[in-house]
Structure formats: C-alpha cells, structure tokens
Image (cartoon, rainbow, N blue to C red):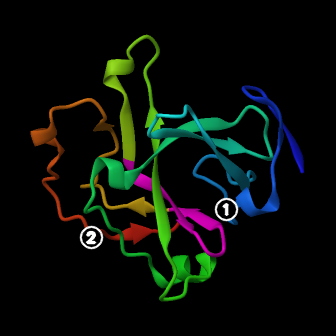
Amino acid sequence: MKIQTSRFGILDVSDETLLNFPSGLVGFPAFRRFVVLDAAEDSDYQWFQSCDDPSLAVVIVDVNLLQPDFRIDVPGEGLAELEMLQSDSILIMAVVTIPSGRPDQATANLRAPLVVNLRTRKGKQMILHESIPLRYPLLQAPAEHTPEHEVVTETASV
C-alpha cells in the first residue's frame, strides 16, 4: 500500500512491515497503523511513522541499546492485546525527544515504551511505574547508564 507522509513523501509500505497498535498511542488513540523507517544507514535511531496521519512521525530507539537489562512485565490484558505466546519475541522502543537547537539534551521516554510482538506485529504503548525515567538522557557518560531502579516494572494499560 502507498502512504503519504509529510517528511518522506509517498512511501510504498508492505503489509509485512506494518505495526498495528489496536489502542493507538497516548494522545493519539485514533492512529493505529505505523511503520518503522531507518533514519540513516549507520544510525541507532529510527522513525516511527503513522500510516493514518501523514504528519505524525517520531524518532524512536531500541531500549536495549540504552539499557540492555531493561525488561517489563506485560499484564494479562496487554498479553491478550498483543496475542503473545510464550515463544514470541518482543521489541521495546522508546520515543526520543530532541529539544529544538539542543540535540545534546536529547532524551528517551523509558516510562512509556512501545512494545511490539514481532510475530503478530501488534503493539501497545505501556505506561510504567513513576520510578522509570520519563526523560532518560541519551548523551551521558557510560558510567551514568546504570539504572538506580529495578528493571522489572509494573505497568498500567493505555
């Protein structure tokens, strides 16, 4: 299918690359279909482009690149929505915020990650416990990457 985007023009998107978020995202419940686009060949960052709204695209990063031990407990409701089986793999992505004119102060939202079942390609934005960083600094010394909280977290549904 072809989708119109404000940043990338018209894209040809295959059904195999579509991600379906049945509940939408926080603040965007009506937009449910997304595609992940590479930002640059050698970049860890990607674009999370809505297939339902040409202007909705956010920068994302794989949470494992920031905190390799990051895990979440997906509640039963979330498991059902993602159609999770015990053998399924998940991808956990964080939305990146880059302040205008201050890319050195970019942060990732670890408190509300995007969780995707790679088999079903269904996703859900999970809202985690308040102790999880809402603004995790992307540019910091490696010693500062050690989380001060338990990485297994409580969730709430969106």
Q: Residue furthest bottom?
A: 86
Q: Secondary structure at mark 2?
A: loop
Q: Residue 156 sits in which quadrant? A: bottom left
The chief SS type of the magenta part is strand
Residue stretch in magenta: 110-125
Distance Cα–Cα, label 2 vs label 1: 23 Å
Question: In the picture provided, is 140 more to the left or to the right than 14?
Answer: left
Specify whether residue 117 is painted magenta. yes
Residue at the (49%, 84%) spot, across then down: 76
Q: Residue furthest right?
A: 1
Residue at the (48%, 38%) spot, across then down: 45
Q: Position of residue 17 (x, y in %)?
A: 72, 57
Residue under label 1: 21
Residue at the (29%, 55%) spot, across then down: 130
Q: Residue furthest top?
A: 101
Amino acid at pointer 2: Val
Q: Is there any visible trace of residue 25 in the rendered image?
A: yes
Q: Is there any visible trace of residue 18 in the rendered image?
A: no
Residue under label 2: 152
Q: Position of residue 124 (x, y in %)?
A: 57, 64
Q: Position of residue 29 (x, y in %)?
A: 69, 54
Q: Position of residue 66 (x, y in %)?
A: 30, 47
Question: In the picture provided, is 95 more to the left or to the right than 154?
Answer: right
Q: Secondary structure at mark 1?
A: loop
Eyeballing the image, is 112 above or below 99? below
Residue at the (18%, 44%) spot, across then down: 145
Q: Residue 123 sits in which quadrant? A: bottom right
The total of numbered circles placed on residues is 2
Amino acid at pointer 1: Phe
Circle 2 Cα neighbour tier, 10 Å, few/some/many (<14 / 14–19 / ≥20):
some
Specify whether residue 72 is painted magenta. no
